Image: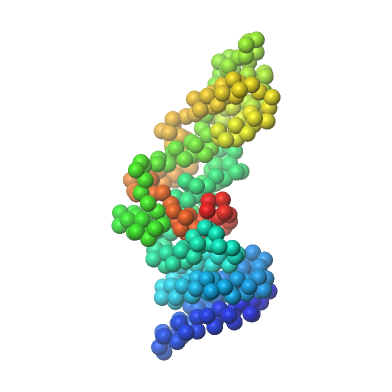
Amino acid sequence: MGYDNTKALCLDVVSDELKKYKAEAYEEAKRRDSYLLEKVVAELSKRNMTDEQALSEFREPSMQYDYTEAQKAYIKAGTPELASVLSNILAERIGESSRTLLQIALGESIKIAPKLIETQMATLALAFILKHTKRLNVNDHSSLVEYIQNTVLPIYKKGVSQKQSEFQHLNFTGCSQYSALSQELPSFFLNTYSGLFMKGIEKDKLPKDADGKSFVDLYPNLFLKCLNNSDTLQINAISEDVLTTLIERLDMSQEHQQIFKKLFKENRMSEEAVQKLVVKLVPEMQDVFDYWANSGIALLTLTSVGIVIGAQYAKIITGQDYDLNIWI
């Protein structure tokens, strides 16, 4: 898949833009133009998109406009992180041929990404990962540690926004807006992975039915040894949503369903205890908790553009793909 036809069309699209530059600036502009095009082609190849499929979308005026905007921005800035983010967004945009909200958000992201510095992109990625995603393979403390070490910490360590002006600029560019209430980081861990943060229930204190039979005997598969206290039991569900799905599959009365939901919620740790446990498991997370508590990130609500840029930057750092259709 050489993408020769797509490359030829792309070069034709930006030819007038390149003519504006003089001498050495012209040569550097050509180099940057070629570099971004090759990165886009590499991304298309990863997605197994053929030259004809890409060319079909590039024949659309809206796609040519978005590509030109990306090239102009990269020719001007020339930073490697911008090339990576733009090439990812362009590849997503080429694959979104219908006029959808996602297509619009991708087009807007092409315009906005060049207005951000790398620390702002990392901030969007950190907010996106912790506020908007759930790792499905996290089901015990060891998998939580692996997730934090391979996803959360690498993004944080790239360097995130510290200045208030950077957060204000994120809002100004339309990547985010401030919410009225601060969203504490421990609450995201607690709500997303509740089953990892249970206090435990002594067996003889579990609810019983009208005949005096313990719930653990009635529904043995819905209990396991508590991850935080092996002398006690906990409900075998990672989150409230998972618990709801499990109990709806069983021939269980509404009364028992409500008892399970109440027990699940009441047995969760406090947010303070959650933070202590996460830091015990991964000491480096103390810096992330401190950052969250003392910067503007706790107030950020990401827009569709913020989600696109955050997801694409997170992909660059972690190698993890994110299906934007889930959020947009």
- 148 versus 307 height, above or below: above
The residue lying at 56 percent from left, 23 percent from top is 258
Residue 37 in view in this figure: yes
Q: Is 46 positioned to the left or the right of 19 in the image? A: right
| Residue 95, percent from left and from top | 60, 64
Q: Pick the residue in front: 15 or 232.
A: 15
The colour scheme applied to this rendered structure is: rainbow
Q: Pick the residue in front: 244 or 103.
A: 103
| Residue 284, percent from left and from top | 44, 45
The residue lying at 59 percent from left, 20 percent from top is 255
The residue lying furthest to the bottom in this view is: 23
- 268 versus 79 height, above or below: above
| Residue 273, percent from left and from top | 44, 32
The residue lying at 59 percent from left, 65 percent from top is 97
The residue lying at 44 percent from left, 67 percent from top is 111
Q: Pick the residue in front: 237 or 260.
A: 260
The residue lying furthest to the top in this view is: 211
- 180 versus 201 height, above or below: below
Q: Is 139 positioned to the left or the right of 265 in the image? A: right
- 322 versus 226 height, above or below: below
| Residue 40, percent from left and from top | 56, 71
